[in-house]
Image: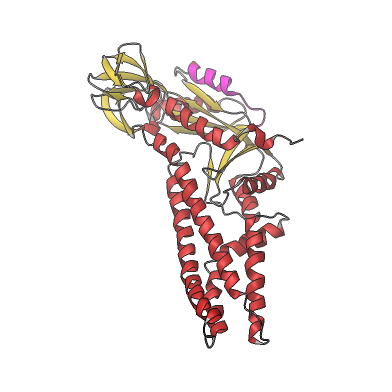
Amino acid sequence: MSDTATRMITLTVPGMGSDHCAGIVRKTLERLDGVGEIQTNIASHRVSVTLDDGGPDGDTLKEAVEGAGYDVAAVSGGNGKQQIRLTVPGMGSDHCAGIVRKTLERLEGVESIDTNIASHRVSVTVATDGPDGEALKGAVEGAGYDVAAVQTEEQETGEGDAEIEEAYLSQARKRLIIAAVPTTLIMLLMMPHMFWQPIPGYLAIVALLAFPVVFLYGGIATHKSTWRSLKNGTFNMDVLISMGSLPPYLIGLIGFVFPMTSFIEMAATIMTFHLLGRYLEALAKGRASQAIRRLMTLGAKTARVERNGEEVEVPVKELAPGDIMIVRPGDKIPTDGEVVEGESHLDESIATGESIPVYKSNGDSVIGATINKEGRLRVKATRVGGDTFLSQVVRLIDQAQARGYPYRSSPIA
């Protein structure tokens, strides 16, 4: 077998339920020219095959496995492309998204880029020999934006999005509080100093209070972003904030040598209002993506399936097409499928909005996440993972947010 791998194809083999079966499938595929590494997963009935350049396609692999006596329910991958998703918490506007897009477009091997401001996501389609996730992350961070997570298409679950957004919101809240407290004290001192009685040592007190706001935890992230942005020849909002806060503070220090009006208060105020805007932005963006996360949590977490004549409980993500699921009254349908035994009424309001339960019996299709109201059903899984109805709805919403409105990219005469 060759060591030069350029693409991967995943086969779903429902009948591969033991180490013996996996061994037969592996040996069958190893006989084919151009096949590299083979990974088998008995729990999910999946075979991941790494192929060399010029190796067999998905149909050839499927025919080989079926020739060994195992049905192949699905074939995915193998198009020479990979999708990588970056989570960029600081990408909160069209301007920021444009900078990220232009930065990634400079990399060789990047084929398409979709940005989603609401969920802070960047989906990048790259050629097999294109940049990996770390290279994309380095490019985006070099443009002045932190990357909270990097996921490939296979790893993408969306389960960590809420934690990432909460961490970003918490950090923005801390920065705001640390900046707001000393800035408020500065404002309270400034009023009597300007309109009533000058305060002894006022300039030194204000300079000390404003220092952590402008230079330390309050403003350090802004200035780092400014430096990286200028270094890469791009401009973002942080550049303007740095230009508005650093010069007033430094000019204000001249007051220690020559009597002059202090501008240090302005520096602290500008930075604090900037951090307030960042916090409100993070709060609004988090709420905007809550609807998608709620949809993703509506499905069942586990499923009861028949394995080797016994009922076992497995995570939904380990289901494969062809699995027979046991759905009891009150349970959610684990994934899209077809009733093979039993009859019942299902609450399909999550999918159709119809409040009246729908009668289902042998041969009827059922939708994952709908609720079985009464009878016991045996359901054959037909679509799993990203192919289910619920996943497709979530994906469509996500893509609609990512692509925005046509007028955004239309030239203005």
Q: Residue furthest right?
A: 413
In the image, taking residue 175 as reference, residue 133 lies left or right, namely right
Q: Position of residue 81 (x, y in %)?
A: 62, 33
- For image coordinates 49% across by 22% down, the residue present is 74
Q: What range of the chain is rendered magenta?
A: 53-66
Q: Position of residue 140 (x, y in %)?
A: 63, 51
Tell me if I can see residue 37 in this picture.
no
In the image, taking residue 166 as reference, residue 214 lies left or right, namely right
Quick one: 281 or 348, which is closer to the camera?
281
Q: Which quarter of the rendered picture does the N terminus lie within?
A: top right
Quick one: 92 or 376, which is closer to the camera?
92
Picture quadrant where residue 350 is located:
top left
Determine if the magenta segment contains residue 63: yes
Quick one: 43 or 297, which is closer to the camera?
297
Tell me if I can see residue 256 in this picture.
yes
In the image, taking residue 315 as reference, residue 209 lies left or right, namely right
Q: Position of residue 85 (x, y in %)?
A: 56, 42
Q: Position of residue 202 (x, y in %)?
A: 54, 83
Determine if the magenta segment contains residue 290: no
- Look at the picture and state if 45 lies above or below 152: above
Q: Which quarter of the rendered picture does the C terminus lie within?
A: top right
